[in-house]
Image (cartoon, helix red, strand yellow):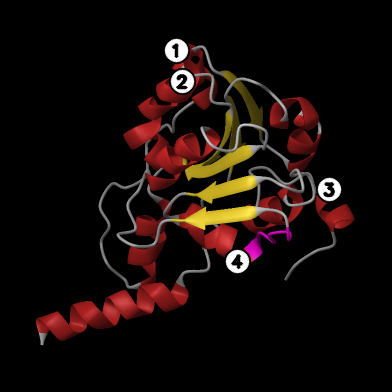
Amino acid sequence: NKLKPQSIAETTRSPIHPSQFFQIIKETLPEDAVIFSDIGNTMAWAIHDLTILEKQSFFLALGLGSMGSGIGGAIGAKTIHKDKTVICFVGDATMQMHGSEVLTAIENNLAVVFVVLNDKGHGMVDHGCKILDLNAGEVRFKNGINFMQWSSAYQLCAYRAETIKDYLNLPLSQIFSSKAPQLIEVMIDEKVVPPVLSRTRVLGQSEQLREE
């Protein structure tokens, strides 16, 4: 169930419920933002809970569904939309796989805002396998990745939000208008099942057909 923005703003839940995060972040984005979502749980929550305004743009590479496509897409878009805020929503597992591409943004002064949803691993794989009663193996990171430290290695300006209040207390206008890349690490509750039931059931049916 969706809550009113004021109700979400007053929550102190930690880690953050991803649905509530996407409901509140839409209240803070520039009205002409260019928004990219990467693949995985990030995609599921963005489609389900992020409302796109008339002057905003939203991009999602569903062709091959490649992890990391949102990162490269956002960096490329910034070369064109130099006067607009370009945002990339990306999961922590994808950022581990393709995050070195932020160096391209840093080296070329392409001010993309990377919003990393950190749920300590491959969330869509984990939840999908549990729904289908399959053994996913080790798809969660034992300790998780600290993206504040990760960003320090790239000399990338970074912030962390462990609650909705933390996020709302960030210097958002400064972040969204910066002339250099920025990163916001959002600590997401890994236990919350993403809205992927239909997709997962179709995959399960396909697997059953192959076995038959």
At mark 4, the secondary structure is helix
Q: What is the spatial separation of the Cα atoms under label 4 and label 1, in whole angstroms? A: 34 Å
Residue highlighted by disc 3: 9
Q: Is residue 207 above or below residue 79?
A: below
Amino acid type of the residue that numbered disc 2 sits on in the rendered structure: Trp
Label 2 crowd (10 A; few <14 / some 14-19 / many >=20): some
User: What range is drawn magenta here?
Assistant: 49-54
Work out whether 56 lies above or below 103.
below
- What amino acid is labelled 4 in the image? His
Of 180 and 78, nearer the camera is 78
Q: Which residue is mark 4?
A: 48
**Secondary structure under the numbered disc 2 in the rendered image:** helix
Identity of the amino acid at label 3? Answer: Ala
Marks 2 and 1 close (CB-CB < 8 Å): yes
Residue depth check, mark 3 versus mark 4: number of the one nearer the observer:
4
Q: Which residue is mark 1?
A: 153
Element carrying mark 1: helix
Q: Residue furthest right?
A: 6
Residue that badge 2 annotates: 150
Quadrant where the N terminus sits is: bottom right
Amino acid under disc 1: Ala
Query: Looking at the image, is mark 3 or mark 4 earlier in the sequence?
Result: 3
Magenta stretch encompasses residue 33: no
- Per the model, the C-alpha gap separating discs 4 and 2 is 29 Å
Mark 3 lies on a secondary structure that is helix
